[in-house]
Every structure is written in structure tokens, then in C-alpha cells.
Image: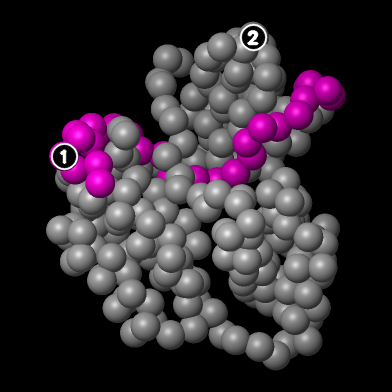
């Protein structure tokens, strides 16, 4: 084991000013997943995972229900995923995941974030090759070997299990999300997840010095202000 990672995913703060953006983000993603995979969470596992995550982030039930009802009606916008990669201030690598109904608008908005902060928008896979696409679970515990063995017995493909300050973090391929979650729940019935999500985890980190920090913060703020941006991943050590 021994691989030390932090999940470097930029998510919007749950302040009053940011709640509308957070709700909109979840509503859009729930709508797209329900429209493409079906509105029944028991049959659409991706939808079930997203609903559980939205509830943890205190998204109101009416926001979730409205998005599912909209998908069930078959009407509404036609959103498509878009991913942009590049290099942010200080030379950090960045992945920007979007949902858009207007690719020209989205690429213009994202490109402006890069160009106005002395950053560089790259080609596809210019940054992603330095990240691992993983399912991540964190929960309280003090025996990482026991967790590792439980996952192996359930035939889960495990990337890593880390123990740090009575907190266990499990990394598995993103395709193993539900298999790993089921194995953990069945093996440790009192388990409560602090984090259970799919993320892009950097293989290495890049230190951001004090001179680059103001521009890095501006870069992140600009990306978060873009309506079509869903998630931002980076390898910056700030």
C-alpha cells in the first residue's frame, strides 16, 4: 500500500450564494443520467449513486424529483458531456468536466478561463494520462489490512487502501464502484462513508508557489463561475 493521495476535486462551497449553482449542477447531471439510462434508480445504478451523493450535499428533494420528472417527460434540453484539459498557473495539470447544450459557448467560456490566467488549454489526453479514474471511499477505521482482505474476498480489483489518522481510504477502478461499496457494507455493517465518489486522482502533484497562487485562485474561481462546468480536477499542491 502506502500510496498517499488527496482527492483534488474542486467543488463549490455550500454557502448561501453558491447553493443555486450547486442545485443547478446536480439537477442537470441527474436529468442527463436519468434521460440516458432510465428514471428508476434501482435499474439505473449511476442515477442511484448520483441521487445519494446529491442528498449528502443537502440538495433538496424537490430539485432531484424535478430533474427526474423532466427526464421522464422526454422534453427539455439536450445536454452532452464535454471534457477539456490543459495546464493551469504554476504548470499544474487540469481536467474540466462540463455538461453543455452549446459546445461553442462552452469551449469559449473555458478557453477564456485559461487565456486570462496565463494558462494553456491542451489537446485531448494532454493531462488525463497523468490521472487515474477511480472510485474512492473514505470512512473511519484503523485496520486497513482487514478492509483490503474483505475487498479481495469479494473479488474487487483494489488499487490501494490507505490508513491515516483513523481514516481509511479505498481506491478501486471506477467500474468497480458498486461492487466495492456492496462488499464494504456487507463486511462492515456499521460503516458510514465520508466520501463515496468517482474522481480523477493525480498520479503526482505539482507545488504552486506563492507568486502563482493568486492567479491559480483566480483560475479556479473563473472556472467555477462557468455555468456549464460540473467538476474540476487538478494536481496542484496548494
**Image quadrant in which the N terminus is located:** top left
Pick out the residue farthest to the bottom.
75
Tag shown at residue 143: 2
Q: In the rendered image, which residue does mark 1 sit on?
A: 211
Query: From this viewpoint, is residue 92 visible?
Result: no
Q: How is the image coloured?
A: one colour
Report whether 45 appears left or right of 9: right
**Image quadrant in which the C terminus is located:** top left
Residue 81 counted in the magenta span: no
Q: Nearer the viewer, mark 2 or mark 1?
A: 1
In the image, 118 versus 8, the foreground residue is: 118
In the image, 98 versus 47, the foreground residue is: 98
Task: Tell me the magenta residue range.
Answer: 187-214
Q: In the figure, residue 155 lies in which quadrant?
A: top right
Helix, strand or loop at label 1? It is loop
In the image, 18 versus 73, the foreground residue is: 18
Percent position (x, y) of residue 176? 60, 41
Vertically, is 112 above or below 136?
A: below
Vertically, is 13 above or below 42?
A: above
Percent position (x, y) of residue 73? 78, 86
Mark 2: few/some/many CA within 10 Å (<14, 14-19, 20+)? some
Report whether 165 appears left or right of 91: right
Tag shown at residue 160: none
Vertically, is 232 above or below 187?
A: below
Amino acid at each position: 500500500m502506502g500510496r498517499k493521495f488527496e482527492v483534488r476535486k474542486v467543488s463549490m462551497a455550500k454557502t448561501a450564494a453558491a447553493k443555486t449553482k450547486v442545485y443547478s449542477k446536480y439537477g442537470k447531471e441527474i436529468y442527463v443520467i436519468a434521460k440516458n439510462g432510465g428514471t428508476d434508480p434501482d435499474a439505473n445504478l449511476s442515477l442511484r449513486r448520483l441521487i445519494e451523493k446529491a442528498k449528502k450535499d443537502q440538495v433538496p428533494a424537490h430539485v432531484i424529483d424535478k430533474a427526474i420528472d423532466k427526464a421522464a417527460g422526454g422534453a427539455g434540453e439536450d445536454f452532452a458531456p464535454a471534457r477539456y484539459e490543459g495546464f493551469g498557473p504554476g504548470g499544474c495539470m487540469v481536467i474540466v468536466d462540463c455538461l453543455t447544450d452549446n459546445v461553442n459557448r462552452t469551449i469559449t467560456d473555458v478557453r477564456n478561463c485559461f487565456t486570462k490566467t496565463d494558462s494553456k488549454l491542451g489537446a485531448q489526453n494532454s493531462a488525463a494520462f497523468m490521472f487515474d479514474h477511480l472510485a474512492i471511499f473514505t470512512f473511519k477505521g484503523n485496520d486497513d489490512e482487514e478492509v483490503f482482505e474483505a475487498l479481495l474476498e469479494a473479488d474487487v480489483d483494489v488499487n490501494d487502501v490507505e490508513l491515516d489518522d483513523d481514516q481509511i481510504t479505498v481506491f478501486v477502478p471506477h467500474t468497480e464502484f458498486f461492487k466495492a461499496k456492496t462488499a464494504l457494507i456487507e463486511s462492515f455493517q456499521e460503516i458510514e462513508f465520508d466520501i463515496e465518489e468517482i474522481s480523477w486522482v493525480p498520479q503526482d502533484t505539482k507545488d504552486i508557489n506563492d507568486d502563482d497562487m493568486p492567479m491559480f485562485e483566480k483560475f479556479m474561481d473563473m472556472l467555477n463561475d462557468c455555468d456549464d462546468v460540473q467538476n474540476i480536477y487538478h494536481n496542484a499542491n496548494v
